Structure formats: C-alpha cells, structure tokens
C-alpha cells in the first residue's frame, strides 16, 4: 500500500513447491529410470572445476485414479480452489490440483522423482506442487506407484507475494518515483 501511495504499480503472484520425500522410503523398482545425458555438461567456464562424477538418475512415475480422487475430494482445502488465493502464477507451472481440474480428461500425469543432491537422502517430487494440507499431501503421495510407503521430509506449500513490474525502472535500475 505504501508503494502504491508513492505511485508504484504493484501486483500479486503465487508460487509453490512440491513436497520432499526421503529417498530411502521409495520403491524405485516400479518406476522408469530417467538416466542423465551420457555427455558431461558443466555450469562453469573454468576447466579446472570440471570434475567428472558418476551421474544420478531421476525416475518417472505417474498419478493414479486414486490420486485424482483424493485431490478432487479436497479441492476446497487448497488456497486457490478454497478462495484464499486469487493471484496467478508467474509462469506456466501448474499445481497438481490445477492439472487435475484443467485436464480432467487425463487419467494420469507424469511425476518425476529427482534427487536433491549426492549426500542427502531427499527427493524433489517434480510435477506435484500443491497447497493441500500436509496430511492430504501424504495421502496423495502414497497413492502414486513407488511412493506407497514414502516418508515426507518437508510438505509442499503455496504462497502469494507482491511484485513490482520491472518496466518502472530505467536502464540504471533506478526509478523516478
């Protein structure tokens, strides 16, 4: 409100993240491995930092009709469908509940299981961001092949935040307001 009073345009956006799951509680045997590229790719231009290492696979699994049923039965508990959040996302990256509502004709959706690092037993459940309550998230996760016995390390969340359009800045990153 203070920034609006000073003449700035502001807006609201939402974002979210999926739950994190303990890798030791996952059955990879029922998932499809998604191996890394065979060629090394580096994030640094410094050849001294190019240290070859063993690659890590991600895994592909899918939602089930039971997953969709749990989501549909609990839509009223989510920030968006419960009316708590009215903002839109900054890019096309729908929550799992958005996918179930917007693509109701689909019986299943891809879920990628991605390791968070080499030394921690934490998995990022790509394609499964949600604003559902924690106990519903666990029920949703456990309805997915390979995650039936999973342990959730951290729940997913959804948040609203304010932003200022960058068009209010000049090339020096300053504003006249």
Image: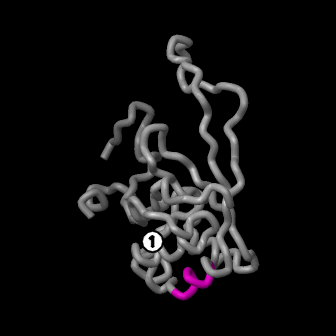
- Left or right of 128 on screen, residue 10: left
Structural crowding at the residue carrying mark 1, measured as other residues with C-alpha within 10 Å and reported as few (<14), some (14–19) or many (≥20): many
Q: Quadrant of residue 60?
A: bottom right
Is 140 within the magenta?
A: no
Q: Residue at x 38, y 35 (%)?
A: 173
Q: Is residue 149 above or below residue 23?
A: below
Q: Residue at x 59, y 54 (%)?
A: 113
The number of numbered discs placed on residues in the rendered structure image is 1
At mark 1, the secondary structure is loop
Q: Is residue 160 visible?
A: yes
Colouring scheme, one of rainbow, by chain, secondary structure, one colour = one colour
- Left or right of 21 on screen, residue 56: right
- Residue 51 at x, y = what percent? 55, 19
- Left or right of 1 on screen, residue 109: right
Image quarter (top left, top right, bottom left or bottom right) of the N terminus: bottom left
Q: Is residue 79 visible?
A: no
Is 69 within the magenta?
A: yes
Q: What residue span does the magenta drawing correspond to? A: 68-73
Q: Is residue 58 above or below residue 87?
A: above
Q: Is residue 56 above or below residue 135?
A: above
Along the line of sight, the residue nearer the viewer: 3 or 57 = 57
Q: Is residue 109 above or below residue 25?
A: below
């Amino acid at each position: 409100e203070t920034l609006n009073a000073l003449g700035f345009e502001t807006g609201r956006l939402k974002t979210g993240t999926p739950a994190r799951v303990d890798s030791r509680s996952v059955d990879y045997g029922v998932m499809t491995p998604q191996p890394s590229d065979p060629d090394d790719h580096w994030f640094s231009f410094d050849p001294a930092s190019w240290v070859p290492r063993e690659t890590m696979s991600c895994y592909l699994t899918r939602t089930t009709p039971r997953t969709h049923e749990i989501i549909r039965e609990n839509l009223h508990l989510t920030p968006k469908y419960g009316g708590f959040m009215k903002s839109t996302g900054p890019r096309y990256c729908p929550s799992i509940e958005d996918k179930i509502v917007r693509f109701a004709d689909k019986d299943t959706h891809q879920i990628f299981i991605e390791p968070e690092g080499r030394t921690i037993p934490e998995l990022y459940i790509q394609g499964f961001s949600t604003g559902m309550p924690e106990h519903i998230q666990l029920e949703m996760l456990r309805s997915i092949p390979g995650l039936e016995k999973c342990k959730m390390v951290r729940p997913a969340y959804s948040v609203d935040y304010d932003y200022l359009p960058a068009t209010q800045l000049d090339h020096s990153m300053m504003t006249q307001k």
